[in-house]
């Protein structure tokens, strides 16, 4: 019988500091046991429990795309006991990952549509996964125009800079990276995510929006999309709640009858409109 | 002695008066319960609510438990002696402003220990009735009366404050206090070896579910984050480990030292019948011995363990 | 279906044969309280209202060690968690589960074996057990199984249903496993029990209180119930202790904790409670259920609205009455259910 509580052992292959304040680091893991990578078959939008022996587990969105073979990536913010411990780990250290958990973004259902992908702060992780996947030659033709809006407080807090600078050079995705206030040396956009979204938002016809960001960003971006004419069914969001099991059993992450871990974390606004705002 | 009906009438009148005169925007009292031998706390906000107020021999909840969360409101509280003492303690410890609490003291002849009742009447009880001195029980084809005096809670048997004289008003007839606890059994415990004491305490708490009902029912456990809930650092494991469970009860006892008014709400709330108050009793005796202090009787006097004087004995520091 | 009689004089032989090849859990007195616990066949009670705690801990203990690791680099797999407790699981037989509690186990089972994941720690214990229910002749004043779709003679979740008759037992199998199990027991003799059971069932059900109408709760949208004004009143007096959740047969929430020693560590789960602020608190300090009101509402919504939505209309409360009896401030789920339905 498969034991969904048992983590796959992984080796920390590479550790990279992502932000100037050093609070975000990207962890590149390789599976210790041959065959585990295949068992950990995932799609963009899913998450995993990062499992540190003796310390505990934290649910983190998968930042790599399944098309990137040989490893999985997670970007972790230092907030609690487990994440702080992880920030002090060294390359070569052994820990575990458990998953994949949750449902991915409904990329199959979105085929044929234009997409606007909106990210705020470090919630960009699973959207990095999504864009890498979408830009694969075998996937890109299945979708219409792709627009990517990504904002952070200042340039030092933007993740994956090499990657989005590469995307900016392409002509099959429009990339708008913005910071909240002017900063020395910044030559890109300045302004909050909702304002930039309003400016660059494609027409709502045959278009879906995928949003992931802090509650305040979602709070102000959601009305922008609704005013632009997006139906709640076409506004797709990923939620976070405190989790333990990740399997829809231990209870705590529920929003109404839905468990964020098992039934989410991806929900449409149409679904969320019928549920308590307990997230 | 005033009848239960008359006392209830007086309570309702006092509550209405407190609302009407602006002494309180909410009155904490008791209402009839939905099951036999139970009453439920009531937050009376209107005159109509006040008509639901009752008094009972089953009023085991210490209503001052709710005061710290209502500290920004003007609150009146229907209080037994021990409850009034807790309210005093909360004021002295700066948890609630004195001007926001209005204590309506009810002289109390003691509350029923449900465990003791069960040991006298084990059959399932379908309905109960009561007067000041008698508990009347009815079941499937039977009826019986039990004298309240025979099934009092242990803390009520040694109550030193049956009439809360420090209350803002006292309704009902004054009742004399009981003979104070002589702690005789604690002397026996003190004479035991450390191993025997450990076995005694572990045995006491072995059924503990770690539900923390004792803590949540306690008017003194108002910490925003209890030490058992701290995660960084995590002081205590969360499992059924007997040492972790024991340490929880032991530390709660220490935290309540010189503050506990012996209201028994902790024991009454415990779903598995742990004699939670025993830990507090031990500290209660220590504080009386060392500082001749009894908490909750004086609106001004600070508990000894929260005060510092330059001439405090310090020879225990080496 | 197989039917048997156990005469009063044969009860001890019967209970003794339950222990052959299996661990027997049955209502026994432990420190003054009746508990579903490992039982000496000599001391099993058949006359009781219900066990103090529910039988869920037989399959979902309050503390359960899930896995362990060692940190010795000289040995294989340092820092790699290995599962505990899944091999050589005890074959158990539970005798004397009340029908309400058996339905509670069914609710739990659909959580531990949900539409996406199977909990192996639950499954191995749950499915290797034989569950013998004991019907209620004299429902206690706080119980209300018939109000929530059950019966004092309910069979759901059981392999065998027993009823006390003439000081002994009448038994009937409910499942094929139950039928097979009954074949090998001692102290039994074949006999027609159906007629007796039907008669006693009618008498017992007649003693139960009127049903609690939940048609409005079923029909209404989540947010319509969520925004009702009565929640504040219930929350006022709630102490946010976890008594209701700990004693509830269908409360299944848990916390996962790691504990370390010098040589390694274990990962365990412990019962948890949605009444605690810590339960839903984010690492960032944000809490989606910040006050007593949200937490109290969560528990009742979960039992009476969310579980029915997810489990084909079946109520998440099975009417055992433990929370009603043990709540320190007399919060009564029957009353809350009525308010939700108003």
Image (spheres, coloured by chain):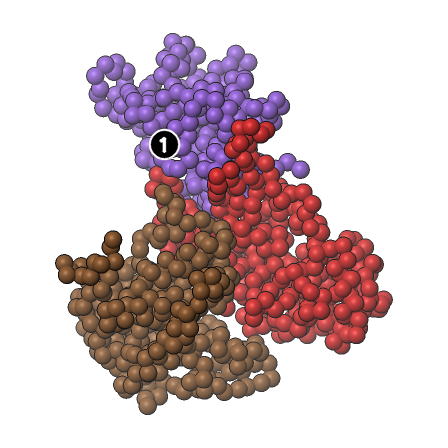
Q: Position of residue A188 (x, y in %)?
A: 28, 15
On screen, C124 above or below C148? above
Indicate left or right for B108 with A205 as reference: left
| Left or right: A202 in relation to A247 | left
- Chain letter tied to purple: A
Establish if A214 lies above or below C122: above
Q: How many marks?
A: 1
| Residue at 60% across, 24% down | A33
- On the question of residue A52 being in view, the answer is yes
Give me the chain that's red.
C
- The quadrant of the image that shows the N terminus of chain A is top right
Q: Nearer the viewer, residue B285 or B69?
A: B285
Badge 1 local density, few (<14 within 10 Å), some, or many (20+)?
some
Q: What residue is shown at x 48% (from left), y 86% (from top)?
A: B146
Quarter of the figure with residue B55: bottom left
Q: Secondary structure at mark 1?
A: loop
Q: Quadrant of residue B309?
A: bottom left
Quadrant containing the C terminus of chain A is: top left
- Horizontal and vertical percent position of residue A84: 38, 33
Residue at horizontal 52 percent and vertical 41 percent from the top: C267
Closest to the observer: A110 or C207?
Answer: C207
Residue underneath mark 1? A78
Chain letter for the brown colouring in the rendering: B
Camera-nearest residue between B243 and C182: B243
Which chain is disc 1 placed on?
A
**What residue is at 35 percent from the left and 78 percent from the top?**
B182
């Amino acid at each position: 019988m498969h034991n969904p509580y048992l983590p796959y052992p992984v080796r920390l292959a590479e550790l990279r500091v992502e932000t100037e304040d050093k609070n975000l680091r990207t962890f590149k893991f390789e599976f210790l046991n041959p065959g585990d990578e295949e068992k950990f078959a995932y799609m963009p939008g899913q998450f995993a429990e990062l499992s540190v022996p003796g310390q505990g587990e934290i649910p983190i969105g998968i930042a790599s795309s399944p098309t990137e073979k040989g490893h999985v990536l997670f970007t972790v913010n230092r907030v609690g006991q487990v994440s702080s411990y992880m920030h002090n780990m060294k390359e070569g250290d052994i820990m575990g990952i458990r998953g994949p958990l949750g449902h991915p973004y409904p990329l199959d259902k979105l085929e044929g549509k234009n997409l606007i992908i909106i990210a705020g702060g470090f919630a960009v992780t699973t959207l990095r996964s999504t864009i890498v996947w979408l830009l694969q030659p075998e996937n890109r033709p299945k979708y219409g125009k792709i627009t990517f809006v990504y904002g952070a407080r200042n340039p030092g807090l933007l993740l994956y800079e090499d990657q989005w600078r590469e995307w900016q050079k392409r002509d099959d995705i429009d990339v708008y990276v913005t910071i909240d206030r002017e900063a020395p040396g910044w030559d890109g956009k300045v302004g909050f995510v909702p304002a930039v979204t309003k400016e660059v938002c494609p027409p709502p016809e045959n278009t879906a929006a995928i949003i992931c960001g802090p509650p305040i960003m979602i709070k102000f971006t959601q009305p922008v999309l609704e005013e632009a004419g997006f139906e709640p069914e076409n506004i797709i969001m990923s939620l976070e709640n405190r989790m333990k099991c990740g399997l829809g059993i231990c209870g705590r992450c529920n929003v109404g009858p839905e468990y964020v871990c098992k039934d989410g974390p991806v929900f449409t606004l149409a679904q969320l409109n019928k549920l308590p705002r307990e997230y | 002695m005033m009848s239960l009906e008359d006392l209830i009438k007086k309570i309702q009148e006092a509550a209405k008066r407190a609302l009407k005169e602006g002494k309180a925007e909410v009155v904490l009292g008791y209402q009839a319960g939905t099951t036999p031998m139970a009453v439920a706390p009531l937050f009376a906000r209107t005159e109509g609510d006040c008509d639901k107020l009752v008094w009972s021999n089953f009023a085991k909840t210490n209503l001052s438990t709710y005061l710290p969360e209502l500290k920004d409101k003007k609150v009146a509280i229907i209080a037994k002696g021990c409850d009034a003492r807790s309210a005093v303690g909360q004021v002295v410890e700066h948890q609630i402003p004195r001007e926001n609490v209005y204590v309506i003291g009810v002289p109390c002849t003691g509350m029923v220990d449900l465990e003791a009742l069960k040991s006298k009447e084990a059959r399932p009880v379908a309905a109960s009735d009561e007067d000041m001195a008698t508990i009347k029980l009815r079941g499937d084809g039977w009826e019986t009366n039990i004298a309240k005096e025979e099934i009092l809670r242990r803390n009520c048997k040694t109550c030193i404050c049956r009439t809360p004289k420090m209350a803002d008003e006292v309704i009902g007839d004054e009742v004399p206090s009981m003979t104070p606890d002589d702690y005789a059994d604690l002397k026996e415990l003190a004479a035991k070896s450390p191993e025997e004491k450990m076995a005694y305490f572990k045995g006491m708490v072995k059924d503990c579910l770690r539900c923390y009902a004792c803590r949540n029912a306690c008017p003194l456990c108002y910490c925003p984050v209890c030490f058992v809930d701290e995660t960084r650092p995590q002081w205590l494991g969360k499992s059924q480990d007997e040492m972790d469970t024991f340490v929880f009860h032991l530390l709660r006892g220490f935290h309540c030292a010189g503050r506990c008014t012996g209201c028994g709400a902790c024991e009454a709330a415990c779903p598995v019948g742990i004699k939670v108050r025993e830990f507090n009793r031990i500290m209660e005796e220590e504080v009386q011995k060392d500082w001749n202090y009894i908490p909750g009787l004086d609106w001004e006097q600070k508990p000894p363990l929260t005060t510092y004087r330059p001439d405090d004995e310090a020879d225990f520091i080496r | 279906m197989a039917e048997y009689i156990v005469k009063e004089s044969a009860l001890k032989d019967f209970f003794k044969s339950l222990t052959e090849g299996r661990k027997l859990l049955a209502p026994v007195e432990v420190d003054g309280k009746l508990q579903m616990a490992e039982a000496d066949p000599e001391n099993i009670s058949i006359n009781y209202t219900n066990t103090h705690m529910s039988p869920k801990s037989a399959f979902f203990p309050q503390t359960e060690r899930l896995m362990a690791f060692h940190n010795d680099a000289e040995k294989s797999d340092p820092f790699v968690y290995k599962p505990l407790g899944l091999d050589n699981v005890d074959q158990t037989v539970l005798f004397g589960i009340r029908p309400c509690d058996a339905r509670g186990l069914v609710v739990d089972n659909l959580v531990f074996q949900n539409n996406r994941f199977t909990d192996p720690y639950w499954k191995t214990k749950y499915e290797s057990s034989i569950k013998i229910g004991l019907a209620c002749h004299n429902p206690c004043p706080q119980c209300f199984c018939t109000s929530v779709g059950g019966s004092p003679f309910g069979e759901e979740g059981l392999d065998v249903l027993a009823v006390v008759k003439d000081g002994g037992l009448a038994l009937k199998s409910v499942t094929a496993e139950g039928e097979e199990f009954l074949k090998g027991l001692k102290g039994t003799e074949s006999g027609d029990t159906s007629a007796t059971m039907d008669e006693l069932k009618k008498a017992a059900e007649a003693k139960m209180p009127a049903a609690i109408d939940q048609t409005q709760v079923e029909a209404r949208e989540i947010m319509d119930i969520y925004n009702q004004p009565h929640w504040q009143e219930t929350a006022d007096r709630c102490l946010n202790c976890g008594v209701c959740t700990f004693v509830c047969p269908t409360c299944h929430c848990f916390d996962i904790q790691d504990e370390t020693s010098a040589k390694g560590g274990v990962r365990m789960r412990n019962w948890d409670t949605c009444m605690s602020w810590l339960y839903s608190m984010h690492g960032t300090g944000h809490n989606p259920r910040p006050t007593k009101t949200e937490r109290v509402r969560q528990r009742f919504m979960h039992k009476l609205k969310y579980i029915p939505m997810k489990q084909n209309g079946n109520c998440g409360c099975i009417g055992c009455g433990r929370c009603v009896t043990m709540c320190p401030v007399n919060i009564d789920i029957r009353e809350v259910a009525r308010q939700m339905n108003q």
